[in-house]
Image (tube, helix red, strand yellow):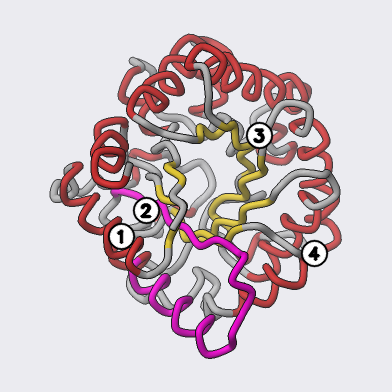
Amino acid sequence: MSFTLLDGGLGQELMARSSAKPSPLWSAQTMLESPELVLAVHADYFAAGADVVTTNSYILHRDRLQTHDAGEKFSELNTLACELALRARDAHGNGLVAGGMGPTGRSYRPDLALDVEQGAEVYAEIATLQAPFVDVFLLETMSSVRQATGAAMGAKTRNKPVWLAVSVDDVDGTKLRSGEPVTDLISVVEQLGLDALLINCSTPEAVSTALATLRQTKSEQKGNQDVQIGAYANGFTKISDAFKQAGATVANLEARTDLDPSAYADFAQTWHNDGATIIGGCCEVGPAHIAELARRFK
């Protein structure tokens, strides 16, 4: 069974290395003020054993930037995010660069998602900017079928592999954060010809439940076995309601204290047992965790 090791969380790692206070545009602001920090984090993930690093472009949507009077920097920031990841990859000598695209509106707020056609236009524009630089598009933290479908349709307008990563309920991993069954994404992935379906930015326990549910359903439906399955959990206790509100920052979230590299890798082993061939880390999962995954799986 092939295995691809993703990097870990970027935004939280940047915060840990920066003296700046959290803000709604934390990662983008760091890229403008201290691009060497972004480059260093990418380099450390490659050094830890990651096969893929993801561009620092999660929040680089026009709507998010315009809210903070930075809409004119949309193209510049997307390009810079790609260039920094490429510099790290070239210095390392090998590896892949994933063009990261987060949700519009706010993370974990599927009620704010654009309709499918509007979403497709938004993500097609980003895909056009990133396509000259990246090896694969990684659609991250999609929390509803509508949100995921629009993003995937937009990314598919360019000739690149597309990996869809969705976030599930922290308590009930069988459901997306919208309340829809996570298994509803199987038909979306197959109909749009996506290359991978991943579970991301949820508690490790919820990720385990989601993957087991997907494995059972795919087996019963005899789904497309060429679609890879993957996972990268976060290290928060949960996504709080306060964090879902406008103006919130990561200061509204609490990191777990029981998820050291060994404990995280134990979860990853169960994901691998359930068919996950693309594994990495999300928020609060850093280079040390990725190094432990490399030791165990590579």
Badge 4 vs badge 3, beta-carbon distance below 8 Å: no
Badge 2 vs badge 4, beta-carbon distance below 8 Å: no
Residue position marked by numbered label 1 in the rendering: 204
Give the amino acid type for the residue marked by disc 4 in the picture: Val
Q: In this image, 127 relative to 171: left or right?
A: right
Disc 2 to disc 4, C-alpha distance:
26 Å
Disc 4 to disc 1, C-alpha distance:
29 Å
Give the amino acid type for the residue marked by disc 3 in the picture: Leu
- Foreground disc of the pair 2, 4: 2
Q: Which quadrant would the N terminus be assigned to in this image?
A: bottom left
Disc 2 to disc 1, C-alpha distance:
5 Å
Q: Is residue 220 magenta?
A: yes
**Residue 116 shows which numbered tag?**
4
Among numbered discs 3 and 2, the one appearing first in the sequence: 3
Q: Is residue 280 above or below residue 209?
A: above
Q: Residue 47: x and y, percent?
A: 36, 22
Badge 1 vs badge 3, beta-carbon distance below 8 Å: no
Local crowd at mark 2 within 10 Å, few (<14), some, or many (≥20)? many
Task: State the residue at coordinates (62%, 53%).
Answer: 163
Q: In this image, 200 relative to 75: left or right?
A: left
Badge 4 vs badge 1, beta-carbon distance below 8 Å: no
- In the image shown, does 145 or 242 lie closer to the viewer? 145
- In the image shown, does 120 or 62 lie closer to the viewer? 120
Local crowd at mark 1 within 10 Å, few (<14), some, or many (≥20)? many
Residue position marked by numbered label 3 in the rendering: 60
Badge 2 vs badge 1, beta-carbon distance below 8 Å: yes
Among numbered discs 1 and 3, the one appearing first in the sequence: 3
Among numbered discs 4 and 1, the one appearing first in the sequence: 4
- Foreground disc of the pair 4, 1: 1
